[in-house]
Image: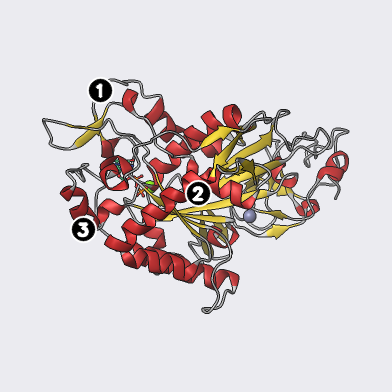
Amino acid sequence: MALSPLADRLLARVICPHCWDTFAPEQVLWVSEHSDLLGDPLLGPEQPQRFLPSRFTVEGDALDAAGMVCRSLACPKCHLGVPRCALEMETLFLSILGAPGSGKSYFLSALIHELRRTLPAQFAINIGDVDLASNRILNECEESLFFNPAPDQLVPLGDLIPKTELEGELYETIALGNQTITYPRPFLFDLRVRPEHHKYSADAPMARLLCLYDNAGEHFLPGKDTTATPVTRHLAQSRALLFVLDPTQDPRFAAAIRAVGGGPRPAGKGGRVSRQEMILHEAAARIRRYTGLSHSERHPRPLILVLTKVDQWSGLLHDADPSEPWRTLSGWNHAGLDIDRIEQQSSRLRQLLVQFSPEIVSAAEGFAQDVFYIATSALGEQTELDPETGFLGIRPQNIRPRWAAVPLLYALSRTLPGLIPRFRRKPSKAI
Ligand SMILES: Nc1nc2c(ncn2[C@@H]2O[C@H](COP(=O)(O)OP(=O)(O)O)[C@@H](O)[C@H]2O)c(=O)[nH]1
Ligand SMILES: [Mg+2]
Ligand SMILES: [Zn+2]
């Protein structure tokens, strides 16, 4: 098979964002368009047939058995849809993991919102939804936080975004023989540098397909990732791990917050206590298993501990400066990350964790070579106690995420330094 006119721009190998199988672009299947061509052995009788084409239009689109022009592609192993751009640009997998209730879904929604705002304006990178249908759930969460139809009404914090379920819309199920397999639905964004970016070249513009997942925290508990539910296998593909840690769930940390006159206050649904380092140990064990990393070796890719809900414990942080850690460098048309500022905060957070939750630092640093700590809030400081319920709420118009994009920008700057430049204050230079 040939994807003829596109062939010179294709990657040598493609990684499926659903089942993480690797295949050559010429093995990709096409999805039939004609309404009679229904029935797929893996996806069921209602789904259009997948096929390996032999006939193409001059534009390079396949023709199905009924002669209709096809537009969509599918993975040869799992038959789930693969966007066409996945054949042309490398996929950058980033895994977000953490205990139930640690704030992953809120963080992910704030992160995407902040990326849409800052990547084009500050870093000369365009970000777009690859497939609105598959990103829909995440976009709805983003809308509920940032484009809420009742922006001035006090909403209990736990009601802004529904709890991530273990099954349902966030997952896709296929039947492989007698076995059903459930995969987490990927959220896919394309990142492309704009002409004013210092790495821009008209012939081969730098671009990546960013692939994220929103797992339920329970998936990271022992025994929850099986052959039938390989829901966290993306960990092995991930170029950087973002471990979402809610310090307010640790009773020792919570006592320290109260001692300086801060939260944590009841947030209604969603607040619960768990031993968060167990999740990290379990994730580490899975990554060792999937990647063949021995127990004496440490994982070579960055591990970023994203400390959430800083609005509740900013009193411990001693960082009164909420401004964003980037700035446009002289002679450049876009910003770079202020690495000194991020590292300073990271050391402070590490100190706090060593003092109040030392197990998490041991778990993180025992597993990965390169561990960073970043404090974020998906919501910002303007939460209010609802006098009727006694629960903490926020008016959507007052939501101001704090540093929500920084963990991902930092991860990008570590894995693709050309894309997001980094600078040090003295001497002020890009690195
Ligand atoms: N104060 C505060 N609470 C938050 C923040 N993010 C999440 N929460 C609360 O934490 C609960 C759990 O968050 P969620 O993202 O659903 O956790 P997940 O289970 O890890 O996906 C939510 O219902 C909110 O009440 C934040 O930035 N600040
Ligand atoms: Mg969730
Ligand atoms: Zn696949």
Q: Amino acid at mark 1?
A: Gln
Residue visible at 79% across and 54% down? 12
Indicate the quadrant where residue 156 lies: top left
Cα distance in 3D space between marks 2 and 1: 30 Å
- Where does label 3 land, which residue? 251
Classify 42 as above or below 128: below
Q: Residue 351, how many percent across, how many down? A: 35, 58
Mark 2 vs 1, N-terminal side: 1
- Judging by the rendered image, the residue that carries numbered circle 1 is 153
**Circle 3 or circle 1, nearest the eye:** 3
Secondary structure, mark 1, is loop
Residue 1 shown left or right of residue 361 in the figure: right
Q: Nearer the viewer, residue 346 or 188?
A: 346
As measured in the structure, the alpha-carbon distance from the residue carrying label 3 to the one carrying label 1 is 31 Å
Residue 106 percent coordinates (x, y) = 38, 41
* Residue positioned most to the left: 388
Give the labeled residue for mark 2: 213
Residue neighbourhood size for the residue with mark 3, other residues' Cα within 10 Å, grouped as few (<14), some (14–19), many (≥20): few
Mark 2 secondary-structure assignment: loop
Is label 2 in contact with label 1 (beta carbons under 8 Å)? no
- Tell me which residue sits at (53%, 38%) in the image: 135
